[in-house]
Structure formats: structure tokens, C-alpha cells
Amino acid sequence: MSILIKNNTEIEKIRIACRLAAEVLEMIKQYVIPGITTGKLDKICHEYIINQQHAIPACFGYKGFPKSVCISINEVVCHGIPNNNDILKHGDIVNIDVTVIKDLYHGDTSKMFLVGQPTIHGQNLCKIAQQSLYLALSIIKPGININKIGYTIQKYVEKNGYSVVRDYCGHGIGRNFHEEPQVLHYYKVKNNELILKKGMIFTVEPMVNLGNHHVYTTKDGWAVKTHDKSLSAQYEHTILVNNTGCEILTLRKDEIIPVLINN
Ligand code: MF3
Ligand code: CO
Ligand code: CO
């Protein structure tokens, strides 16, 4: 069996890991307030995953990443390293990206938090980023070309005057953090054709910039920032392709979309 199609045993384990990852985001919400450091938020997530969930924070030590979750503020696009100097303030937009390993299988999800009194710019950007993810989930079903995901996201984001980051993509997930297939969030001509099939599990995780799509890696070797210093927002779900559409494995209680999407 190819790594692309998961069997029922694997699906159940990934489902559990995904639920745990989503529950970390639900748990941390109450702490994401002005005055807290990203280091403290990381510590709370780390201890929750290990002591309450009896699971492993997948980011910790992954390719040398030094912390348990990624926390990316404002113009930081992704892979922000939590630390004790970055203090959240009113109006910040913050992505927390959580990947949990339970019983050898991974679950990966992220969302934006609006800190204190939000700004209109921050609010609108986050709304469009989340809607772009939901729109992509509303076209996923067996038989479609995987390229349609990126096409759908890019068209919606650009129609709203924002841009989609090209340098990072969604990914298959399972025993490994990052597996085949690559899930692009923009349309690339002559990209490898892949037809979605029941049993595939992958993430969709568009990063949306207020300015242009160019980004760079900072000198800590991890945090990625927008080239033009504009705000960036990202939402990520891990999904299972089923018979009629997809199942959102990392759905949270604060979301209003259904867990099973018939497309
Ligand atoms: N969670 C990220 C993703 O969505 C990957 C983070 S890798 C790390 O794929 F090393 F930065 F943690
Ligand atoms: Co991911
Ligand atoms: Co992630």
C-alpha cells in the first residue's frame, strides 16, 4: 500500500492525534492575552501535551527546532520560535501551530488569535485566511485534481486583495510529520497531477499576506517573515478524504463548519 492511502487502523490513530492537537488550541485560547510572552505560551502547551495528553510535541527537536509549538506574530509568516522576550500586545495577530504525536501518529493544526482589542486590518486578514481554508475544504472529494485546492485558495485570496505565500505548502501526514503529497496553496502550471482518493490524509494550511507574497527566513534560521513587513495570517487543518468529501480531523469547538463536508 502506498504512503498516500491510510488504512482504518492508521486513520483512527491519526484521528486521535488530530483531536489532541485541536484541543491544545482550545486550551491555550484563554492565555493568549496582552502581556504574556510566547515563551510562556509554549511552556503551557508543552506541559499540557506531555502531562495531560500523554503525547509528544512533534516540533520539539524536529530538524533542530528548539520549542514545542510555533508561534508567529504579525509579519512573522510561520515557524516563529517562542521566547521570553516577545510579549503579546493589543492588536497583535498570532498564529499558534501545534503538532502532536500520539501512538506514533501525527496531527497538525494552527489558527490565528486576535490579541486584546483587534485592528480592522488584522481582523479582515484573519477572516479571509480562514475563509480561504474553508473554501478549499468545500471542494475536496475523491476524483478531483489536487491542483484545484491551490487554485481555489489563490483565486479567493487575490480577489480580496491579499496574496498567498508560495514557499510553503500543505503535506501528507501520518507516521511522519511531512509526507507526500505536497499541497500547494496557489496554482502552478504543469504541477504534478494527483487525483484525490478516499483514505488520503493531508493538511491544508494557506499563509495569506496583506502585502505581496514574498517572504524570507530570518537569521535565527526558523522564523519566516514577509519581505514587505506586512501582516500575515495562517490557518491549518488536517483532513481525511472520504467517499463524498472530507472529514476535518482537527476541527475545534469554536468553529461553525461541520466535521463532515459533503462535496
Ligand atoms: N507545523 C508546521 C507545519 O504545519 C511545521 C513546523 S516544523 C517546526 O507543517 F520545526 F518548525 F516545528
Ligand atoms: Co502542517
Ligand atoms: Co502545522
Image (cartoon, rainbow, N blue to C red):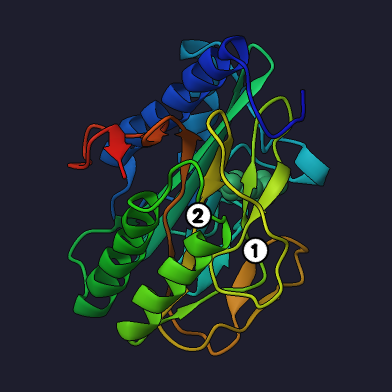
Q: Ligand 2: does it lie within 8 Å of the C-beta at label 2?
A: yes
Q: Amino acid at mark 1?
A: Tyr
The residue shown at (78%, 63%) is 221
Q: Is mark 1 within 8 Å of ligand 1?
A: yes
Identify the image quadrant of residue 30.
Answer: top left
Give the left or right position of residue 177, taking residue 115 as reference: right
For marks 1 and 2, the one nearer the N-term is: 1
Residue that appears at 35% across and 74% down: 156
Residue 96, given in percent of the width and then of the height, sits at 46, 48
Q: Nearer the viewer, residue 154 or 263?
A: 263
Rounded to the nearest angstrom, the CA distance separating label 1 from label 2 is 9 Å
Q: Nearer the viewer, residue 98 or 198?
A: 198
Does the residue at mark 1 contact the one at mark 2 (Cβ under 8 Å)? Answer: yes
Q: What residue does disc 1 label?
A: 168
- Residue position for label 2: 205
Q: Position of residue 159 (x, y in %)?
A: 32, 84
Report helix, strand or loop for mark 2.
Answer: loop
Q: Quadrant of residue 61?
A: top right
Q: Nearer the viewer, residue 136 or 148?
A: 148
Residue 108 x %, y %: 54, 37
Q: Is residue 91 visible?
A: no
- Please say if 109 is above or below 234: above
In which quadrant will I find the N terminus? top right
**Which amino acid, mark 2?**
Glu
Q: Does 3 sit left or right of 163 as displayed?
A: right
Above or below for 54 versus 199: above
